[in-house]
């Protein structure tokens, strides 16, 4: 009898311990999922709110870029516009000029302007946007970020929302899209703040130096499946930094080329030191250093003349929009940017009223 009583006490004790353990487990579980939430919400930056529009399912009238789209491999030219416009198809004159200059100088290449946000075109588009549609090699398309990364090395990386940790989401999404577009299709990527001065149609696998530390990501060419494209996308996947402006753009191409060419300095990459990949000197794509961006806007004749001389052998000018967007060009002035636009994007230029 004593034994039995003891036995049932042990049993009660055991059940009590079990219940306590269970409560303890629920408590810890609840607590940890709450801290997860706290961690996630501080990890995902406020700035990522700005790119919410990529997930909108509002009406989009642009053609959809899908795996079935017939994008010419190796020869296409890509621009991306990531800034989440929510009222029609809007481009400023400078962006339109970049696109016209590329289409005009490369008439046998398709020039794509890619939007990751839905775009609802209106009945009455701006004149300079309408003019671009008049070039039969200019195509404007929408990509759905939900599916665009499928089948690429960034598929799960993107789904996990790593890009949402960015402090500079428009810039960083533009960085990511350019490398993945070139990874998928080969071809040439151009920033919207360049003007093309020459044709790139016979060129492949190239980039250009923009400073002592960086290769530029404003103009890049990879052939389809090129090793540098793989290195670039892999670099993004492994090292993406949301709080460094240049890390995921010029940083990616600079690190990838150093790796591919086994070089430790940017100057060691230039010209023919990089296997089948050509790295052009600064004069090719960034003839005016970013610190001197205001030279493109000068009204001083001497400075103007020196700029025109410096860009004589360049393929593009890069006007550093990030720094120069607040500075006006007045029609008919001697400002170099205006004079170059008049020549290289004449149709867009003809629609400008007073300043751009
Ligand atoms: C793209 O270029 C690469 C390298 O020149 C070549 O191997 C590949 O066949 C090209 N692809 C197409 C579809 O032309
Ligand atoms: C640039 O031009 C716009 C439009 O004419 C004008 O409103 C603005 O004040 C100008 N900015 C400067 C810095 O001159």
Image (cartoon, helix red, strand yellow):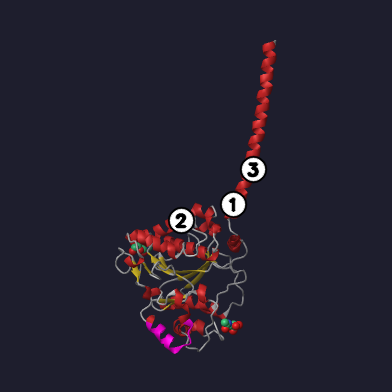
The residue that label 1 is drawn on is: 40
The percent coordinates of residue 128 (x first, y second) are: 54, 80
Q: Is mark 1 within 8 Å of ligand 1?
A: no
Q: Is residue 137 left or right of residue 167?
A: left
Q: Is residue 246 above or below residue 320?
A: above
Q: Residue at x 58, y 58 (%)?
A: 45
**SS type, badge 3:** helix
The residue that label 3 is drawn on is: 31
Numbered label attached to residue 239 = 2
Q: Is residue 135 visible?
A: no
Q: Which residues are magenta?
A: 296-309
**SS type, badge 1:** helix
Q: Is residue 121 above or below residue 240?
A: below
Q: Residue at x 44, y 89 (%)?
A: 301
The percent coordinates of residue 291 (x first, y second) are: 45, 75
**Most foreground residue, 177 or 202:** 177
The percent coordinates of residue 106 (x first, y second) are: 41, 75
Q: Is residue 117 visible?
A: yes
């Amino acid at each position: 009898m004593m034994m039995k009583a003891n036995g049932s006490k042990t049993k009660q004790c055991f059940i009590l311990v079990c219940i306590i353990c269970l409560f303890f487990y629920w408590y810890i579980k609840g607590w940890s999922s709450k801290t997860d939430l706290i961690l996630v919400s501080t990890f995902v930056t406020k700035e990522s709110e700005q790119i919410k529009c990529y997930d909108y399912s509002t009406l989009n009238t642009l053609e959809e870029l899908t795996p079935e789209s017939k994008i010419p491999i190796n020869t296409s030219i890509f621009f991306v516009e990531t800034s989440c416009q929510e009222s029609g198809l809007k481009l400023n004159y400078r962006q339109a000029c970049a696109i016209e200059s590329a289409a005009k100088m490369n008439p046998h290449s398709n020039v794509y302007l890619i939007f990751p946000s839905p775009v609802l075109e209106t009945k009455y588009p701006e004149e300079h946007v309408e003019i671009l549609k008049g070039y039969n090699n200019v195509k404007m398309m929408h990509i759905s970020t939900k599916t665009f990364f499928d089948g690429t090395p960034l598929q799960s990386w993107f789904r996990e929302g790593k890009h949402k940790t960015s402090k500079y989401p428009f810039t960083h999404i533009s960085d990511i899209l350019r490398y993945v577009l070139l990874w998928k299709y080969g071809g040439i990527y151009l920033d919207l703040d360049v003007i093309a001065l020459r044709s790139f149609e016979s060129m492949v696998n190239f980039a250009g130096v923009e400073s002592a530390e960086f290769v530029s990501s404003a103009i890049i060419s990879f052939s389809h499946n090129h090793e540098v494209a793989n290195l670039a996308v892999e670099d993004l996947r492994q090292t993406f930094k949301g709080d460094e402006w240049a890390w995921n753009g010029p940083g990616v191409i600079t690190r990838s080329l150093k790796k591919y060419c086994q070089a430790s300095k940017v100057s060691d990459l230039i010209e023919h030191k990089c296997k089948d990949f050509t790295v052009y000197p600064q004069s090719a794509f960034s003839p005016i250093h970013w610190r001197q961006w205001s030279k493109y806007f000068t009204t001083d004749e001497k400075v103007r003349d020196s700029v025109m001389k410096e860009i004589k052998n360049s393929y593009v000018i890069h006007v550093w929009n990030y720094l120069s967007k607040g500075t006006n060009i007045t029609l008919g002035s001697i400002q170099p940017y205006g004079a170059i636009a008049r020549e290289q994007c004449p149709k867009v230029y003809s629609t400008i009223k007073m300043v751009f």
